[in-house]
Image (spheres, helix red, strand yellow):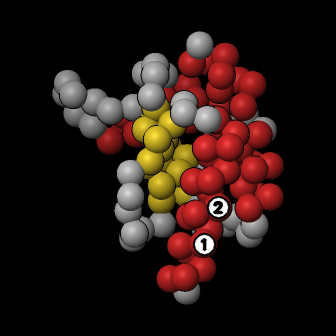
Amino acid sequence: MRALYQTRRDWMIAALREVYGDLFFTEQNDGGMHIVAFLTRGSGDREVARCWQEQQLQVNALSEWYRGSGKRYGLVMGYNNVRSYQEALDLLERPKRQTLALLS
């Protein structure tokens, strides 16, 4: 089971890079069921999260997990329902235009 989750995680990270280039970055994390994708520009993670949720992606705004100053911005992404690399690409393409508009 662990190998399956790692494969799905790898698909999602690779698809995120292919679709969004350097808009997000991830840090190595071998455990868990979520990916933290940090924004490289902008602080509108709540708007981006809402946009992605409307497209049926399992995400939450990273900034919602912080209190006070020193927030980091990005998305906490679920990936357990992704069954292929192509599916990951297709899912991430759905909100691309809106995401780029929100962060430009």
Near mark 2 (Cα within 10 A), the count class, few <14, some 14-19 or many ≥20, is: many
**Relative to residue 72, is residue 98 depicted above or below?**
above
Near mark 1 (Cα within 10 A), the count class, few <14, some 14-19 or many ≥20, is: some
Q: Residue 29: x percent and y percent?
A: 38, 62
Q: Does residue 52 appear to the left or right of 2 in the view shown?
A: right
What kind of element bears circle 1? helix
Three-letter residue code for mark 1: Thr
Q: How many marks?
A: 2
Three-letter residue code for mark 2: Trp
Would you say residue 87 is visible in this rendering?
yes
Would you say residue 61 is visible in this rendering?
no
| Residues at marks 2 and 1 touching, judged by CB atoms closer than 8 Å | yes
Q: On the image, which quarter does residue 11 sit in? A: bottom right
Q: Which residue is rendered at x = 55% and y = 46% of the image? A: 59
**Quick one: 58 or 35, which is closer to the camera?**
35
Q: Which residue is rendered at x = 71% and y = 23% of the image? A: 98
Q: Which residue is rendered at x = 74% and y = 69% of the image? A: 83
**Relative to residue 90, is residue 67 depicted above or below?**
above
The residue pinned by badge 2 equals 11
The residue pinned by badge 1 equals 7
